[in-house]
Amino acid sequence: MIRIKIKTVLFLTLLEIFLVATTAFEETCEFDREMEKKCRIHNYKTVKPLLDYFRQVRNELEDKEIKENKLIELNSDLMEKYHKIVEIHEKFTKEAALLDEYKNKLLKADNDLELCQTNIYRLGYRVNLQQNQIKEELIYKANIIANYQHQLDTLNSRLNEKDEFIKSFNVDTQSITEQEIIIATKVEKSQTQQLMKDEDNQLCQSQNDNLNATSCIPFGDSNVHQLNISGIGCFDVLCDSQLAGPGWIVIQQRVGGNDSFDWNWATYREGFGSMDSDFFLGLEKIHRITSLQRFELYIHLVDNDGSIYFAHYDDFKISDEDNGYALSLGSFNGTAEEDAMSNGENMKFSTFDRDHDIVDSNCAVEYRSGWWYKDCYNCNLNAPYGPNLNWWVKNKIELIEAKMLIRPAVEEVSI
């Protein structure tokens, strides 16, 4: 547009010059009519280039106007196409958002399916474990019945022997001499039988003492023995007389086994695992044992470097199930730097199906194990192997082994 304006000004200037020149030239030609023809020819020659230039300028102006109109049309068409492109882009954006939403729904469905499969596997594993526990219990009870049957057969045999003795005594009462001989023989035999009976009574008393044991103190070794606790009857325990002196009951053990500790409330109540690997004795058994008298707790810890620590509490017990098997510890001492266990003092036990912690989330779900959680824990000896299996207040001790042992408390404990 600026170039057109410049050319227009130039054209007007040239036109004005032309008019002035023409006027001057005509005044000169009035004095000389003879030169009129020449003047005309001269004027034509003078004006012709200007006329050609004016024609060229006009043509260029017309071309510019045509091009500007075309440019306006092109701009209009371009704007229309731009709006269409914007509409297509918005439509594409909406479709992309819908596609992302469908992808997220599909991913959530896959995650839900995987979770269901995991739950099915876990339930199957628990069913198999419970079946094995029932089989072991049936075998154990069958053995007890067989033992009782053997004892009954022995008693019947002795009664038959006594009956035969009485018959023999009645038959041999014909003469005094014979009676004296028989009586002497019987006295001797009776004395022998009495000695045998006394030995049997002593053995039986010893067996009864062990059968009615409520702790590992009567056994004095490191082996599996049977306790008889009021309210739940007889059950096996692992005794330990090596880590911290004689008479300890192992109630929890982590020694590198593959047993999961992510179980529900009922499984933790009854107990699980194998005594030659990782196991948990059972909340109800621990409650029944510690309710008989005062017990002390000894915790054996081994870190990733093989360093060994212990923590000792002088009054350990847990409440009954109605009160959530709440934890009570007593006073702390030990080689572990800090008292990490007391974070769970007075807390109820929590599992993924019974949440008793004080935070909004479920600590048992987050750390995949049952424990006396608070917010969530300073130590969790039931956590999966890794960084969560630790003893931690200020300085974190990551563990590869952990054991919890209890025994009746004494006035002074030598650790």
Image: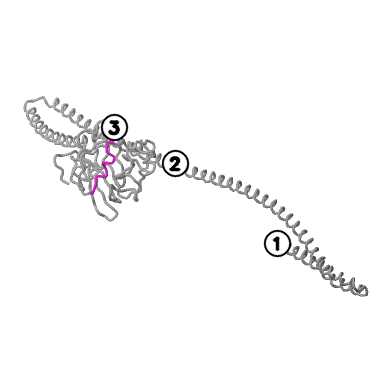
Quarter occupied by residue 157:
top left
Q: Is residue 179 visible?
A: yes
Classify 288 as above or below 28: above
Label pair 2/1, CB-CB below 8 angstroms = no
Residue bearing the label numbered 1? 2
Residue type at numbered disc 2:
Asn
Q: CA distance from mark 2 to mark 3?
A: 29 Å
Classify 53 as above or below 290: below
- With 125 as the anchor, is 256 left or right in this view? left
Q: Which of labels 3 and 1 is toward the front? A: 1
Q: Nearer the viewer, residue 229 or 158?
A: 229
Classify 30 as above or below 184: below
Label pair 2/3, CB-CB below 8 angstroms = no
Residue type at numbered disc 1:
Ile
Residue bearing the label numbered 3? 320
Q: Which mark, residue 119?
A: 2
The image shows residue 4 at horizontal and vertical percentages of: 74, 62
